[in-house]
Image: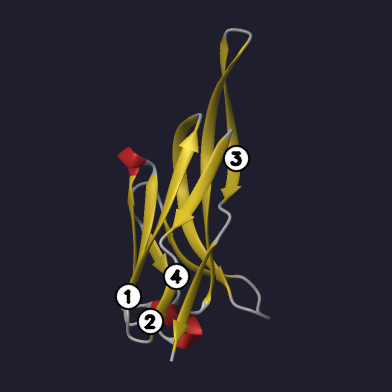
Amino acid sequence: QVQLVESGGGLVQAGGSLRLSCAASGSIFSINGMGWYRQAPGKQREQVATITRGGTISIVDSVKGRFTISRDNAKNTMYLQMNSLKPEDTAVYSCNADIVQRTVERGLPRYRSLEVWGQGTLVTVSS
């Protein structure tokens, strides 16, 4: 099994900071693209930021200059540093990753490409 677990969410005042982490675990061979998404109450999920294995980054305009995405490939972990938080940043933040899983079946290695989502972590920014 492969899973993603987010942590670091919580309640913060406007102008404050939070750092989210997304840790992948399980029978992982490699992790390609990873990303952070958020869904505010009554709104559709939106992509916040993505990062490739090589470090190429894409960030939505509404958080540019305030949020930073990074990853540690050795730890299979991705981060989202969120500064100057605003009430409109309030949402459930979820991480997503394209993972190549390696298993052994009948003595032979087998590789599967999986798209995996974390369970989400709530970020609430008070005004």
Q: Nearer the viewer, mark 4 or mark 2?
A: 4
**Closer to the N terminus: mark 4 or mark 3?**
4
Percent coordinates x, y for residue 106 in the rendering: 63, 8
What secondary structure is marked by label 1? Answer: loop
Look at the image and tell me whether residue 82 can be seen. Answer: no
**Residue 10: numbered disc:** 4
Q: CA distance from mark 2 to mark 1?
A: 6 Å
Relative to the observer, which residue lies in front, 65 or 89? 89
Q: Are marks 2 and 3 in contact (CB under 8 Å)?
A: no
**Residue 85: numbered disc:** 2
Relative to the observer, which residue lies in front, 125 or 97? 125
What secondary structure is marked by label 4? Answer: strand
Categorize mark 4 by other alpha carbons within 10 Å: few (<14), some (14-19), many (20+). some
Residue at x 60% of width, y 40% of height: 114
Q: Amino acid at mark 3?
A: Leu
Q: Are marks 2 and 1 in contact (CB under 8 Å)?
A: yes
**Residue 58: numbered disc:** none
Q: Are marks 4 and 3 in contact (CB under 8 Å)?
A: no
Percent coordinates x, y for residue 80 in the rendering: 37, 63
The C terminus lies in which quarter of the figure?
bottom left
Query: What residue does disc 1 label?
Result: 17
In the displayed structure, would residue 98 be above or below residue 35?
Answer: above
Percent coordinates x, y for residue 49 in the rendering: 44, 65
**Closer to the N terminus: mark 1 or mark 3?**
1
Residue at x 41% of width, y 65% of height: 58
Categorize mark 1 by other alpha carbons within 10 Å: few (<14), some (14-19), many (20+). some
In the displayed structure, would residue 38 be above or below residue 54?
Answer: below
Query: What residue does disc 3 label?
Result: 114
What secondary structure is marked by label 2? Answer: loop
